[in-house]
């Protein structure tokens, strides 16, 4: 079990922290809604999920071995995509299971404490912020909407590209072709930006809040198309159908762009706003 | 984690979307041990490297105009 001894805030204690156990933090919930929610759940180390309660709040935690989850081992493991994927899914699975039972403030992956006492201290010192965050996400879910564009369709939408079929590969012809390509690419960029703006504005009307995240690299998304919008939205659970219908309606009226919904997610992208305010 | 929960059925989670949220989202609390933003960047860099190296094993696209990255 986690050592309940005094915490030494120095580099030496952190280096020594690859021995023994740590406390992995998954989420914060209200103590009143905590009854039974962690029963049967297991976490990133296959450990039993438990609660650390203080001040009307409960931290959802698991005891993890520091030889794997200490500072240095964590840094090493980050380079291992399989490890990262497995632990990310386990972290999310716990939070998602809790979220099905009630409001939850998800905690960023890989937040580890040296003992339960430290977790209680965090619950005490940031009590007001956690309550505000819980209040903000109560009855709401996060839905992601990505818009993928086919650049050639966007580019040619109102500027048909003057392709001459029998064009020779002379230097001049090559330069002309290249110039046209650049100009049509630029045109496509502008069209994509305008579409993203329009889609985001339309979706915001059906959401409590929303934000545009940076588009993932095409090589990461595994698609050739551009991600013109990587939006994520905080939606009332009761309004989720409406939101999905709005996405479907936008899809109908948007040529050359494919919309993809992900979620419902626990409110990963919105619970932190209150904290940083 | 083998248990299939109802809400997971319609939730085919792409790794990139998942990492975007569990690493890029959630409440950031200073733990005794925490990943810094710099570490997260590191993750993305190594993901990029991995996926682009897989991509290079695939046949080249013949379209010489397709320089959109």
Image (cartoon, rainbow, N blue to C red):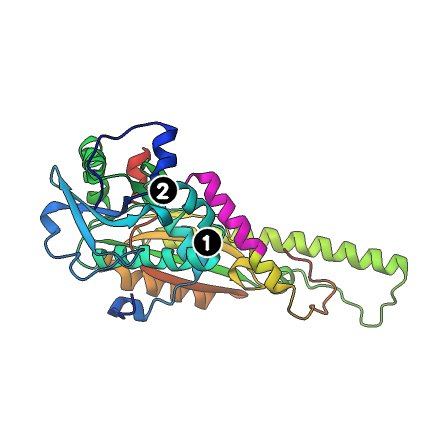
Q: Chain of mark 2?
A: A
Membership of A171 in magenta stretch:
no
Magenta stretch: give its range: B34-49
Residue visible at 35% across and 59% down?
A89
Residue visible at 28% across and 37% down?
A274
Q: Is residue B32 left or right of residue A100?
A: right
**Mark carried by residue A97:** none
The local secondary structure at tag 1 comes to strand
Q: Chain of mark 1?
A: A
Distance from label 2 to label 1 (Cα)?
A: 38 Å
Both labels 2 and 1 in a single chain: yes
Residue A187 rendering spot, x and y as whole percentages: 65, 53
Membership of B36 in magenta stretch:
yes
Magenta stretch, overall SS: helix
Q: Is residue A202 left or right of residue A207?
A: right
Residue A45 rendering spot, x and y as whole percentages: 31, 55
**Mark carried by residue A230:** 1
Q: Residue A151 lies in what quarter of the image?
A: bottom right
> Can residue A144 be seen in the rendering of this structure?
yes
> Can residue A250 be seen in the rendering of this structure?
no
Q: Is residue A87 left or right of residue A23?
A: right
Residue that badge 2 annotates: A18
The local secondary structure at tag 2 comes to helix
Q: Residue A158 lies in what quarter of the image?
A: bottom right
| Label 2 Cα neighbours within 10 Å, binned few <14 / some 14-19 / many ≥20 | some
Residue visible at 19% across and 43% down?
A135
Q: Residue A262 lies in what quarter of the image?
A: bottom left
């Amino acid at each position: 079990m986690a050592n309940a001894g005094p915490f030494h805030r120095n580099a030496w204690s952190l280096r020594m922290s690859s021995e023994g156990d740590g406390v992995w933090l998954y989420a914060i919930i209200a103590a009143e809604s905590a009854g039974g929610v962690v029963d049967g759940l297991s976490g990133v180390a296959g450990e039993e999920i438990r609660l650390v309660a203080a001040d009307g709040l409960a931290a959802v935690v698991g005891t993890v071995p520091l030889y794997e989850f200490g500072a240095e081992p964590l840094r090493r493991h980050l380079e291992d995509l399989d490890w990262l994927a497995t632990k990310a899914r386990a972290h999310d699975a716990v939070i998602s299971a809790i979220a099905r039972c009630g409001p939850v403030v998800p905690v960023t992956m890989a937040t580890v404490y040296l003992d339960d006492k430290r977790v209680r201290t965090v619950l005490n010192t940031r009590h007001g912020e956690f309550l505000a965050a819980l209040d903000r996400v109560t009855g709401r879910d996060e839905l992601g909407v990505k818009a993928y564009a086919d650049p050639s369709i966007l580019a040619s939408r109102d500027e048909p590209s003057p392709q001459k079929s029998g064009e020779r590969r002379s230097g001049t012809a090559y330069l002309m072709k290249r110039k046209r390509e650049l100009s049509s690419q630029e045109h496509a960029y502008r069209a994509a930006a305008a579409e993203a703006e329009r889609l985001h504005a339309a979706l915001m009307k059906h959401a409590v809040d929303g934000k545009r995240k940076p588009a993932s690299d095409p090589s990461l998304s595994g698609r050739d198309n551009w991600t013109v919008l990587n939006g994520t939205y905080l939606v009332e659970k009761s309004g989720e159908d409406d939101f999905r219908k709005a996405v479907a309606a936008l899809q109908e009226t948007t040529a050359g762009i494919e919309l993809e919904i992900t979620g419902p997610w626990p409110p990963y992208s919105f619970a932190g706003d209150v904290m940083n305010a | 984690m083998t248990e299939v929960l109802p809400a997971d059925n319609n939730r085919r989670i792409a790794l990139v979307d998942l990492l975007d949220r569990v690493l890029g989202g959630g409440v950031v609390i200073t733990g005794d041990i925490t990943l810094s933003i710099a570490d997260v960047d590191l993750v993305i860099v190594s993901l990029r490297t991995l996926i682009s190296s897989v991509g290079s094993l695939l046949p080249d696209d013949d379209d010489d105009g397709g320089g959109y990255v």
